[in-house]
Amino acid sequence: MRTFPELLIMLGITFATLIYRGIKDGKSYKEYLEKAGSVYDKYAPYSFKMVRDKAKELGQEYTMRNYLTQVIVLGGIAGVIGYFYFYSLVWSIIYAGLTIALIPYISYLRYQRIYSEFIFEQIQTYCTNVIMEFNTTQSFVKSLEGVRDSGIVEDPVLSDISKMIDLSYKNGTIDESIEYFNSKYPFYMVKNMHQLFLQITKEGAKDAGESLENMSMDIDALVEGVYRDQMDRKNFHSRFLTFGLVLFSLVVVVEFMLGKDNYIDLLKIWYVQIILHLIIIINAYFLITGEKYYNEDVGAE
């Protein structure tokens, strides 16, 4: 009976042979991956396509090589864990396949983080420049037009600024336009700044300079806090992944303490296998939840 390392070597040789045959026939593995990607694009949710398009525009989209690396690394780790938990090639392949199936979701979380960071930077630019424009124009709508025409803001924020301007001229007030923008971008800096402009518009622009200066300082403090939170999340993420791998390795430690033969005898007990599956599922859920926390709501203060 062949050992697990020998099987891995055989699978590696088989994979390399398939790549070689593909190149020889004029079809590289990249073409096959692109076909698989086009199938996923057809059925992927709109939110995935939107954030991936923005990541591509920002030059941060994963290449086929990145995806292939994830498949090999994550699938390989899951396969090794599945085998050394159950000494079963079947369970090794099942857990490797399930892990590979999660890669599109993990990629989506990463794209969502990139997108939220982009939106936050755009909102920061919007708030800062509206205040600067108002110091010159003394009109909130004119300030919006100045930011829109300056070319410093990109879509989707740019389109929403244009929508605000249209709503303001249509209604003769800025109330609905501000409500619209606040609902699209519920950041504290946006709500606080808009509330100040509502007050200035209704009560007059007299002595507004000091209030706007204080608002600019508040925005700078909020931005500094968010960037500090991003750094903390990045440090937490690396420690979290290390801790997750340590959790998976605890069963291997137990196996070492009992001895391989005694451990294999334990595997013959049905509830021991159920417990091992639960350990894998719970640890996997723990890791996915942490990955979700790291990537979601990055721009929220």
Image: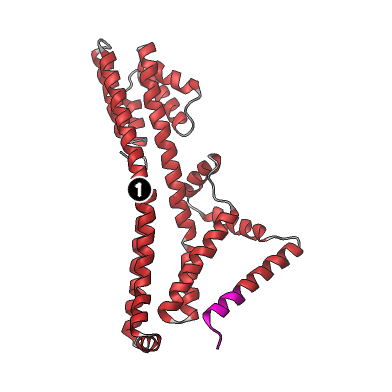
Task: Read off the magenta span.
Answer: 1-11
Neighbours of disc 1 within 10 Å: few (<14), some (14-19), many (20+)? some
Q: Position of 65 compared to 267: left or right?
A: right
On screen, 298 above or below 72?
above
Q: Position of residue 89 (x, y in %)?
A: 50, 80
Q: Quadrant of residue 280?
A: bottom left
Q: Position of 186 compared to 84: left or right?
A: left
On screen, 48 above or below 76?
above
State the residue in front, 90 or 164: 90
- The residue at the far top in this view is 206
Q: Position of 222 compared to 137: left or right?
A: left
Q: Quadrant of residue 248?
A: bottom left
Q: Which residue is mark 1?
A: 233
Give the residue at x 36% y 56%.
Answer: 239
Secondary structure of the residue carrying tag 1 is helix
**Chief secondary structure of the magenta portion:** helix
